[in-house]
Image: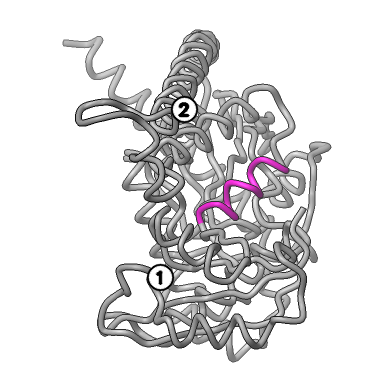
Amino acid sequence: MLKKAILICIKFPFDEILDIKNSMEELEDLSRTIEVEVLDRIIQSRKEPDPRYFMGYGKLNEIKQLFSSFKDGEIYLIFNNEISPIQARNIENETNFKVMTRTEIILEIFSLHARTQVSRMQVELARLEYKLTRIIGKGKELSRLGGGIGTRGPGEQKLELERREIRKRIKMLRDKLKVIDQEKDTQRKKRIKNTFKIAIAGYTNAGKSSLLKKLTKANVLIEDKLFATLDTTTRKLWLGDGIEKDIVITDTVGFIKDIPHELIESFKSTLLDTINADLIIELIDISDKNFENKINVVDNTLDEIGVNSNIILCFNKVDMLTEDEIKLVRNKYKNAIYISVKTGEGIDELKNFLKQYISTLSSRTSTTKTATSSL
């Protein structure tokens, strides 16, 4: 478990400083989730990355001197940027501080919060695929340990063996997950008839699990942590009499800006419940000052995973805002639903919307079937 860290971000000319600051705040939240004490945040502006250290050597040396009282390996430098394995190694050799990236922090959180066999396999797959792209040698000596031209030294042979073992493990995990996916697909097809499927999607820690519990009275894990939910939770939802279809509602893993591609790929099967939903409740924390950016992240992620379902925008935590603040948002997002899972405000409005939506859809389907049978 990490103890202390310095967060570092390199700002390039095309980056907005406000976006950088917001992203660094989020990186600090991510770090705290794995119990890291953040000692400092450092933002350096550069026209382009330094090929050897990514950041400037002067700034790196300044950090080294500033935190020289700590023992070797006691401090982590966590980069908000995706730096290369060679740059990470060069920084570690220069400073004796350990280096991690934002992606590795997210993977660490997923690893800690994976509770089922499936989610543990998905996280391991993502970590191995990320690691495979970042295996590097141990320096110049690596290519000089062998004999003459065309020969490979023991260092290179060791690396190749490691790559081979990782590829072997990746294939095994993919094969196992494929079998599980096929079993889940069979289960989905069995319950798809006469069932209306709702999925709750949103940024991590927006209150998705809390909303599922509020709507269904389900006993689900509620934690004020990023990525507390990694496994799909599906429950039946009752909206009163007059609806012929069974209704199920699903809470899945939350989204985040710059979510590692490896995680999206390995969790594709888990996200199928979102992809195959008849309606998606896009839940947004309205009390978050960056909520509009997070709407964009959620929308882009839904597009990336191939969602074509209808989406209803739902703002949570209205109890955290004043009436005037809510009014400003309402004027821009007129068709959204405004709720507080904590106080229950707006929950009946959400239920009524869902009931009316499903009833109207069922009525249209019934009319279409009648018209078709009379031809």
> Start and end of the magenta stretch?
103-112
Q: Which residue is mark 2?
A: 158
Residue 139: % across, % down: 42, 50
Kindly identify the amino acid type of the residue bearing the numbered disc 1. Answer: Tyr
Residue at the image point whose x is 62% and y is 66% from the top: 96
- When asked about the image quadrant of residue 92, the answer is bottom right
Can the viewer see residue 40 in this picture? yes
Residue at the image point whose x is 65% and y is 66% from the top: 76
Which label number is shown at residue 111? none
Residue at the image point whose x is 59% and y is 29% from the top: 247
For residue 73, above or below residue 197: below
Q: Which residue is mark 1?
A: 53
Q: Is residue 31 magenta?
A: no
Left or right of 61 on screen, residue 3: right
- When asked about the image quadrant of residue 322, the answer is bottom right
In what element is the residue under mark 2? helix
